Amino acid sequence: MIPPVLDSISQRKSYTKKRTMTSQAGHGLINTARLKTSLKMAISKLKFAQDKKSALNKQLRRQLADTLRQGKETSATIRVENIIRDDIYVELLEYLELYCELLLTRISLILDPARAEIDDGLKEAAYSVIYASQYADLRELNIIKEILISRYGPELIHEVSTNEGNVIPDRIITRCKIEPPSEKLVTLYLCEIAKAYKVPYSGLQSESDPESIERDTESAEQNDTGDSTEKDNNSTEVKPAPETQGKKVDDFDSLKARFAALKGAPKS
């Protein structure tokens, strides 16, 4: 039997050995276990945050429907902005979850000591996580940010802040901004909530045909992304990457998906 004092020393050696099981690459040491754990925890917490925020938004939509039922449209117009903002925030969390999954899947590229520079296949995910970490209230994202900076050097912060190479997609930058939604988007939300809960709303009377909602949605999406992009070009903020037609369609489909969820809400 090993004496207690020797057992203690053995435990210390084992602990020291585990602490040194890191991958040396680029500018510094990478704690492999810490990076993997942080990515897995971030994915788990991002999913939980999405579910929690979505459940809360369902309650807010139900309350907003009651407000419309009482004829308080001015109050509903103001309160719906919180719902829109939360929906956009949930979308941001969804993207960050996917990026964390990508980083976890390709973690071997981060740990490869032969790769001094960040791999092109990791740039969008890494840059987006670093950029959005200040907007998403999640400790693990900041830990991942610190590890990536330790891996690739402090100049990584400069590359992210200037969006070097337009790597950070517009869908991330626009969802990180805190700007009031357009009037058309507000009206569209109120119309869909009124339809879902079968309550009166004056905005429903302005619909001339079934396609009007989709036209207004597309116009609102283009205004939101177009206006914000133009502002970025004239400011010192991060410049969004040019979006392809496919990405615009993805954002439009995302908005329609939210409305599909609204239509599936229980009627009160």
Image (tube, grey):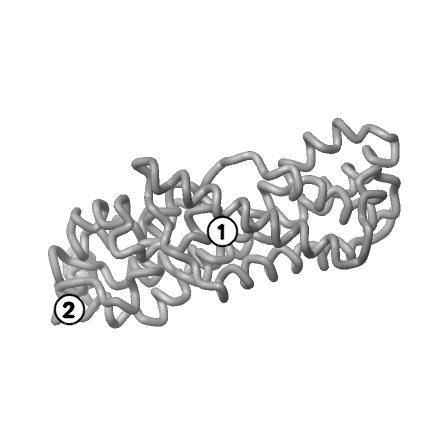
User: Considering only vertical position in the picture, is 31 above or below 89?
Assistant: below
- Please name the residue shown 18% across and 57% down the image: 151
For the residue marked with disc 1, what is the amino acid? Leu
Q: Measured from the top left, where is residue 129 in percent x and y? A: 36, 53
> Foreground: 100 or 193?
193
Specify whether 68 is left or right of 53: right
> Foreground: 245 or 112?
245
Q: Measured from the top left, where is residue 137 in percent x and y? A: 45, 42
Q: Measured from the top left, where is residue 250 in percent x and y? A: 54, 63
Q: Quadrant of residue 203?
A: top right
Q: Give the SS element for disc 1.
A: helix
User: Of label 1 and label 2, which has the lower sequence position?
Assistant: 1
Report how far apart the C-alphas of labels 1 and 2 lie in the structure: 29 Å
Question: Which residue bears the numbered disc 2?
Answer: 115
- The circle drawn on residue 92 is 1
Q: Quadrant of residue 202?
A: top right
- Please name the residue shown 83% across and 35% down the image: 68
- Please name the residue shown 86% across and 51% down the image: 267
For the residue marked with disc 2, what is the amino acid? Arg
Specify whether 48 is left or right of 25: right
User: Considering only vertical position in the picture, is 48 above or below 181?
Assistant: below
